[in-house]
Image (cartoon, rainbow, N blue to C red):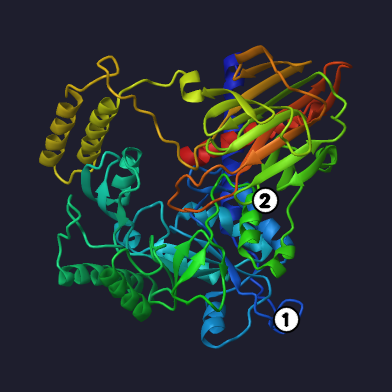
Amino acid sequence: MYKIESSKDIKKLIRSILELVLLLSLLAFVLNALLTSTTYRPYNPLDTNVVSRMDHGFIAVSYSGVARDGSSSRIGVDRLDEHLNALQKCGYVTITQNDIDNYYNKGIALPDKALFLMYEDGRNDTAIFSQKLMEKYNFKATMFTYAEKFRSKDAFFLMPDELKRLEESTYWELGSNGYRLGYINVFDRYDRYIGELSSEEYSSMSKYFGRNYNHYLMDYIRDENDVPKESYNEMQKRILGEYGLMKQEYQKGLGKVPGAYVLLHSNTGKFGENDKVSAVNERAIGNTFAMNFNREGYALNNKKSSIYDLTRLEPQPNWYTNHLLMRIKADLPEEDQKNIEFINGDGDSKNAWELEKGAAEYRKNDEAIALTSLPQEMGILKLKGSENSKNVEVSATLKGNVLGCQSVLLKADSKLDAGVEVRLMNNHLYLVNGKDILEDIDLYDFDGGEKTSVEEDMRNSLAGEYAAFARYATSHKEAEEYTKLSNEAKKAKVKTLQDGGEEYRPVFQIGDKGNRKLDITLIDNMITVKLDGKVVFENYELKKIGDGAIYLKSAWTEYGYSQRNIADDVYDGVFEKLTVKDLDNGTVLYTNVLTGVQNVQRKAEQTFNSVINWFITNI
């Protein structure tokens, strides 16, 4: 029997009990995720409220993966829940591969609000964390997989027996991303030829690359001069060999080849970058699959589409729900756009603001306002009752992505061309008075970002590339050779900034997250601005300023670049812990900062989730 003889024993006992509770909670969570207690209920094709026989096509929405708390590439469970909940509230019902086949080949009508739901890459955590949501919303989806993962028995990915069980649950169908995710004709950002890479090699080296690469089935394999290294027959044999390997693994593991396919990454208007390659892919796809999603970045498919040239929208992990709905709405015909209803969130916060453009979600538990812009446009909120405030103080943490625009406007008119604007855009801080940009602060310099020359970065990236090749070498000798090359590259003498070299500046990606604490004080025509606790402007005199209201603005600024969403033209400005004070009478005009019991409860939930996430990641 365990004896308690000291305070140390008491602490050990308490710790053991807490660990047991956490383990039991984790076990309960996993069991709840894996056990299916219901059956998918298909829509009723005879219900004219669902299927009016009018042709509205269907939307396809595809997630690259699901993680409990989200990651840079996989959506979190809570955010996915919000997305699916909103789609259901808009009236969408899920359709199957057979529904799509019948729609194109037999002319059978689809539901007026038809959704084809997809999950790509076939990861275990995607199935675990999305299963209960599929049951909750009675949605059916297609799980896409890489056949090569069956052969490698990669523990992160679903194996044939697990895929069979997914099918048996009735909430899933199976699809294919092909045999493997491979890269060819890769050049780094300095146009140095890399060649062919596996997905793992590419991921470890991607920070050194730009856009100059292709996917395994998209082109001839070429040399550094863009000349094919293979003949037509060799190219055809290689590509058809991939389809052959894929069929072999699916037949062996599943007893069949899935009906739906995603050709990665096409978006070319055909089936490859080269006409001859496209023709080989087109024949192989037609002989193997019932349908192919050949494009991405656009949600709607209709009779004008080919069943082998379908498109899907790929929501990113950072997209707020209104971002998804805004993208879908923009893709729909005008008569169907009325079906999209944006979500608002907390009613008390909503009542404090007047939405003038875009969509706004008031997220009480997150202490945030997510202001979603119109496509290639703005989102605008006006704080009600702020027109009479002369001297004000505004503080907030701005968490929209780096590429895009988030602004606070004070004493602004309805056209936003008068007053003062503090604008955070594309990693610059701007002070704008009326239409005049008074100050432009480069935040890379403001943050004290590392100063290096282009030649130094070229050297360092080459050393990094060699080091990555060493990690993935197939023999000890090869690893030693690449390690030697990496060490030699590090020692190369290059022109530094001190030598007069050109300065290197990192390029931001469309998904890079922002996190800036902004404090603004405006007294008469003097403004003080702090960013991340540092004074940027102090008692800065503004020349032209009159009466006006307080506004928040978000705006799309540029496409940036994303392999998954080449044309995302919607932006989410995120204003967290926002407080607006009237300095003349000491009143708080608005705040979304939680206090008291609500704040304690929120922190407790965050702590518990952090502990559970740690256990899931490390056990």
In terms of depth relative to the viewer, which is nearer, 263 or 179?
Answer: 263
Q: Residue at x 38, y 76 (%)?
A: 255
* Residue 619 visible, this orientation: no
Amino acid type for the residue under numbered disc 1? Ser
Relative placement, left or right, of 346 versus 483 is: right
Establish if 278 lies above or below 68: below
Q: Residue at x 72, y 48 (%)?
A: 359
Which dot marks residue 309? none
Secondary element at tag 1: loop
Q: Position of residue 457 (x, y in %)?
A: 29, 28
Relative placement, left or right, of 473 versus 576 is: left
Q: Quadrant of the N terminus?
A: top right
Q: Position of residue 46 (x, y in %)?
A: 72, 85
Residue at image mark 2: 322
In terms of depth relative to the viewer, which is nearer, 202 or 611?
Answer: 202
Residue 170, quarter of the rendered image: bottom right
Residue at image mark 1: 52
